[in-house]
């Protein structure tokens, strides 16, 4: 429980700028951003060329004006793509509201940027494909399920990360990796795999190889500054 405070104490504003500089020096040109504008600050201060992909957050009632304002903000800030945040997509699919995701994608595509759909549950891309949601890419979790702190098979249930429950320790975000691999092989849209290290439970050498050999086109990986050089060299 001390880790969140440790993380925030370490990742100061100066450290964030240093981390992006190290990333750019090692061939990383795009990151996910929460909307905190740290990429813009980095580019301005260090003459950087880092790109960013922020998430949008359609709600159940789909307040279109609020969503349009959010999209406009990110477009004006220089985003190169947009995607629906995975937690939001999970909740909407669980509620049977894939039409809300579809409308959000349509609104975002009006910006002229590529638009993706994020999710932790396999039901998200499955529902989007079935409903022919006009997204350009998917952002989907993928990691092995054989590490010691994984949720035991008999306790796994879809959307467990939304509900919690016995056996869930906030580091299993892909409860059915082989099913994910099999389904995504039938999808023609590009796929960014994330949580590939299961929140640090899997070593990069194994996690990266598993993601790429399983068909992921890109991987999104959370890293500290001191991990970037080694991990970039590993991918290369």
Image (spheres, rainbow, N blue to C red):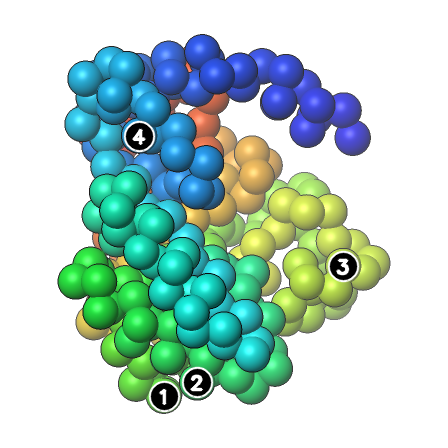
Residue designated by label 2: 99
Residue 197 appears in view? yes
Horizontal arrangement in the rendering, residue 122 relative to residue 112 (left or right): right
Q: CA distance from mark 3 to mark 1?
A: 28 Å
Q: Can you tell which of label 3 and label 1 is closer to the viewer?
A: 1
Q: Position of residue 167 (x, y in %)?
A: 78, 55
Tell me where residue 219 sits by quadrant: top left
Quarter the C terminus occupies: top left
Q: Which mark is residue 131?
A: 1
Q: CA distance from mark 3 to mark 4?
A: 35 Å
Q: Secondary structure at mark 2?
A: helix
Q: Secondary structure at mark 4?
A: helix
Q: Can you tell which of label 4 and label 2 is closer to the viewer?
A: 4
- The residue drawn where x is 45% and y is 27% is 223
Going from the N terminus, do you reach mark 4 or mark 2 first? 4
**Discs 3, 4 touching: Cβ within 8 Å:** no
Neighbours of disc 3 within 10 Å: few (<14), some (14-19), many (20+)? few
Q: Can you tell which of label 1 and label 2 is closer to the viewer?
A: 2
Q: Can you tell which of label 4 and label 1 is closer to the viewer?
A: 4
Going from the N terminus, do you reach mark 4 or mark 1 first? 4
- The residue drawn where x is 33% and y is 49% is 74
Going from the N terminus, do you reach mark 3 or mark 1 first? 1
Residue 211 appears in view? no
């Amino acid at each position: 429980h001390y880790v969140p405070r440790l993380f925030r104490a370490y990742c100061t504003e100066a450290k964030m700028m240093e981390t992006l500089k190290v990333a750019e020096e090692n061939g990383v040109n795009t990151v996910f951003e929460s909307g905190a504008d740290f990429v813009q600050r980095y580019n301005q201060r260090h003459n950087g060329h880092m790109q960013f992909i922020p998430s949008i957050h359609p709600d159940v009632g789909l307040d279109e004006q609020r969503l349009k304002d959010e999209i406009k903000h990110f477009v004006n800030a220089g985003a190169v793509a947009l995607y629906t945040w995975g937690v939001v997509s999970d909740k909407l699919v669980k509620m049977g509201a894939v039409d809300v995701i579809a409308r959000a994608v349509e609104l975002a595509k009006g910006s002229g940027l590529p638009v993706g759909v994020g999710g932790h549950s396999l039901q998200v891309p499955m529902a989007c494909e079935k409903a022919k949601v006009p997204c350009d890419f998917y952002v989907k979790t993928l990691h092995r399920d054989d590490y010691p702190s994984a949720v035991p098979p008999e306790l796994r249930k879809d959307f467990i990360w939304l509900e919690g429950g016995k056996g869930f320790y906030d580091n299993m975000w892909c409860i059915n990796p082989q099913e994910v691999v099999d389904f995504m092989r039938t999808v023609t849209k590009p796929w960014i795999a994330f949580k590939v290290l299961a929140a640090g439970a899997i070593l990069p050498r194994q996690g990266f190889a598993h993601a790429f050999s399983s068909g992921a086109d890109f991987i999104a990986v959370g890293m500290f500054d001191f991990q970037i050089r080694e991990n970039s060299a590993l991918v290369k």
